[in-house]
Amino acid sequence: MEILEYLLMVLTPTNLMWLTIGSLVGAFLGALPGMNADTGIAMFLPLTFNMDPLTGLLTLCAIYTSASYGGNITGVLLNTPGTPEAMYMAWDGYPMTVRGEGAKAIGVTTIAAFFAGVVGALALLFLSPFIARFALKFGPMEMFLTTMLGLTIVIGLSKGSMLKGCLSACLGLLCAMIGTDDFIGVSRFDFGLKELYDGLPLLPTVLGLFAVSQLLIMVAEKKGTVVCKNNAMAGSPFLSLVEMGKLAWVTVRSSIIGTIVGIIPAASTSVAVGISYGISKREDKDPDSFGNGNPKGLATASAAHSAITGGSLVPLLTLAIPGNATAALFLGGLTIHGLAPGTKLFTTDGHIVYPMMIGLVLAQFFILFIGLFGAKYFCKVTKVPTNVLIPIVGCLSVLGAYVFRYQSFDMILVLVCGLIGYYMICTGIPPAPFVLAFVLGARAETSWRRMATLTGGSESFLHMMLKPVPLILLALNLLFLISPFWKDIKGLFGKRAQEVQ
């Protein structure tokens, strides 16, 4: 009965109006390069100050959820991720658009994002205290091994072009080392540029590699539109039961992985997508199709990405530990309305928190509505002439890079990265390993050095390593590392057995 009462509290005209406004604003900001959930929440925090606490928090939840999804749209249709995390949707989403399945790609990413968002929100609603206690067990060793799970996907992405893939990953790791060393405070590999003091900025780098490089390819190929076929956007975003059945298992599995990774403080979307994508690719009958327009790859990335939203709020509400930067801004929203995260939050302020979590579930339905019923309008962007589209996307990319830190240096950086990305594509060097290594490299280094500082010796290291959770994570790392070559290893032993006989 309490859940019904909380649901009725959410379903008031005022709350539904602000849920709608927050969802539309978040989707719009998420689709624009340089804008994301952080921008939306930061913009709306002052507006929620005079609102009822529940209404204000519902608005922030809607922005958080829809902005995380909004970047998928431009990533799938234009290979221009609206948010850094949406770059993973471009791996399989954009190739689907190029071969004339843009509407279907929108449907896949929307349904996967909706389902995963519901899973993450329900986990927040029912499992918060239990899962948060488990997340506390993740120290530097566990964080390092979890991050390495994301890095081992580089091996899978490089299969078939190992040298070029590893070259791309090594370049990403080198770029991740640019900036001030967090432990000794010494700047490294910044070539004397003050703009690189905090490291190579993520969004300008990603926009250059994915968006600007794609614009250069359009110019070189002299295409009239993004897709050349007249029936390129034929079809419907509404998937058949057969199509949804094929995607069901990878979506469920990725939703669970994304929720769990989101709960771990300081873990990232890259870890969730890396783990999920690696498992899906390894178990698929046609692993080489991943990265070339496989709907399962798109569903995997979308589900893992969206499930992070609900998961990241679990440690925030129960332990006052933000799961990511957006959750940290969300903490400001709680503070503004006089709510203190912790165990007492669910007792003293349960009449606000529980309706808010139910509102997070309802916000997922706005994603479904925006994606499925707005797809026919989104798809029209692929028919815009390139002589119009290229200047617009180019300006948005440069502007998005500038808005990220408000530094003119980033406007030059996005162009330089675009040239590098264009060269990588022309020479067959995959950009995906670079991005994963770049995003996860700094996190892996920090976790490793923190662990080395805390242990201080081999005995302490072994004592920390021989705990159940690190051993399980180490086994998973070895499994993911070997699995891409399992058929080759099996065939090699088979040949030797035949020779012995």
Image (cartoon, rainbow, N blue to C red):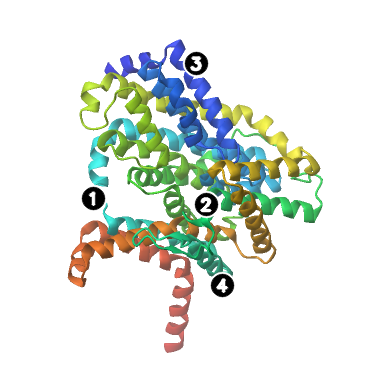
| Residue 83 in sight from this viewpoint | no
**Could you say whether the residue bearing mark 1 is in a helix, strand or loop?**
loop
From the image, tell me which residue sits under label 2.
Answer: 201
| Dot 4 amino acid type | Leu
Query: Is the C-beta separation of discs 3 and 2 under 8 Å?
Result: no
From the image, tell me which residue sits under label 4.
Answer: 163
Compared to 241, does 285 lie above or below? Answer: below
From the image, tell me which residue sits under label 1.
Answer: 137
Disc 3 versus disc 1: distance between alpha carbons?
A: 40 Å
Q: Position of residue 138 (x, y in %)?
A: 27, 52
From the image, tell me which residue sits under label 3.
Answer: 17
**Mark 1 or 4 closer to N-term?**
1
**Could you say whether the residue bearing mark 4 is in a helix, strand or loop?**
helix
Closer mark to the observer between disc 4 and disc 2? 2
**Could you say whether the residue bearing mark 3 is in a helix, strand or loop?**
helix
Compared to 363, does 33 lie above or below? Answer: below
Query: Who is closer to the viewer here, 140 or 11?
Result: 140
Query: Is the C-beta separation of discs 1 and 4 under 8 Å?
Result: no
